[in-house]
Amino acid sequence: MKNIILSLFILTFLFSGCIDENITHVSENLEITSSYSLPIGQAEYDINEYLNALKDSPFPWQDSLYYNDTLYPNYLEYVDEYDIKAFDFSRLGEELDMIESIMFRIIIDNGYPTKAISQVYFSDMAMAYIIDSVFAGGPHIIQPATIDDNGKVVEPYHEVFDVYMPQQFIDNMADIQHVSIFNRVYTVREDIFHTKFYSGYMFKVHIGIRVGLRFNIEDMQE
């Protein structure tokens, strides 16, 4: 990994002109900042398992919805989905001491005509406890997709989040080995009496990480 960092330093050095007046001497106290990005993973969800189960449900029921243009009773106001990604942050190894910032980019596409909520949790190897989460204030509300006059989705709701993590997260990175993506898709909305769902609807999440580094040229000589 030091070879990668050294290569980043050389490129920065060549293009920045950070050379003393005496070109034969380079300051040993030169501080370098750099960054790189890594994919965490992506997840695609649908709630078709729940919707398909409604076909065997008897009427009447207080709520109902359309699924593939057929009216069914609706027993749940929302459906939860989880996806767990193994990602060992300790594999960054010696870089952990050089990390200055961590930023997560989360891209969400809600293809459902109802709102959703989303959260990303970080846990230890045994998944015994949650170490941290991306949205500090709790799960983030995702707006519904755009629908036409007939209640059909014409365009998914798209949102991009760039979330910088606090120092506490950086301090605990060595213990993080799992990333859990939680999403809740609602089956009702206040402004529509019978919400329409179709089997082709999807909820998509993409997660990447950008690691910011700060180190001294002396670190490359150890």
Image (cartoon, rainbow, N blue to C red):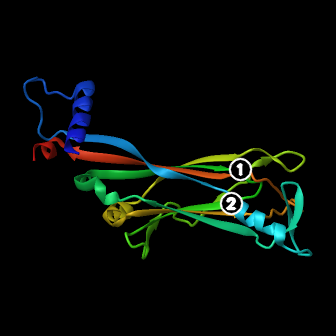
Residue kind at label 2, given as amino acid type: Ala
Residue 156 — which label? none
Give the position of the N terminus as an image quadrant: top left
Which residue lies under the disc numbered 2? Answer: 116
**Residue drawn at x 17%, y 27% as measured from the top left:** 19
Circle 2 sits in a helix, a strand or a loop, which is it? strand
Q: Of 4 and 162, which appears nearest the observer? A: 4
**Residue drawn at x 21%, y 31% as measured from the top left:** 10
**Residue drawn at x 22%, y 54% as measured from the top left:** 94
Q: Earlier in the sequence, mark 2 or mark 1?
A: 1
**Residue 185 rendering spot, x and y as whole percentages:** 69, 62
The number of numbered badges drawn on the structure is 2
Q: Is residue 16 above or below residue 141?
A: above
Circle 1 sits in a helix, a strand or a loop, which is it? loop
Q: Of 136 and 187, which appears nearest the observer? A: 187
Residue kind at label 1, given as amino acid type: Gly
Q: Is residue 13 visible?
A: yes
- Which image quadrant for residue 122? bottom left
Alpha carbons under labels 2 and 1: distance apart: 10 Å
Horizontal placement of 143 versus 1: left or right?
right
**Residue 23 rendering spot, x and y as whole percentages:** 11, 23
Which residue lies under the disc numbered 1? Answer: 111
**Residue 55 rendering spot, x and y as whole percentages:** 83, 66
Horizontal placement of 219 versus 127: left or right?
left
**Residue 204 rendering spot, x and y as whole percentages:** 61, 51
Residue sticking out furthest to the front:
56
Nearer the observer: mark 2 or 1; the answer is: 1
The crowding category of the residue bearing disc 1, from other C-alpha atoms within 10 Å (few below 14, some 14 to 19, many at least 20), is many
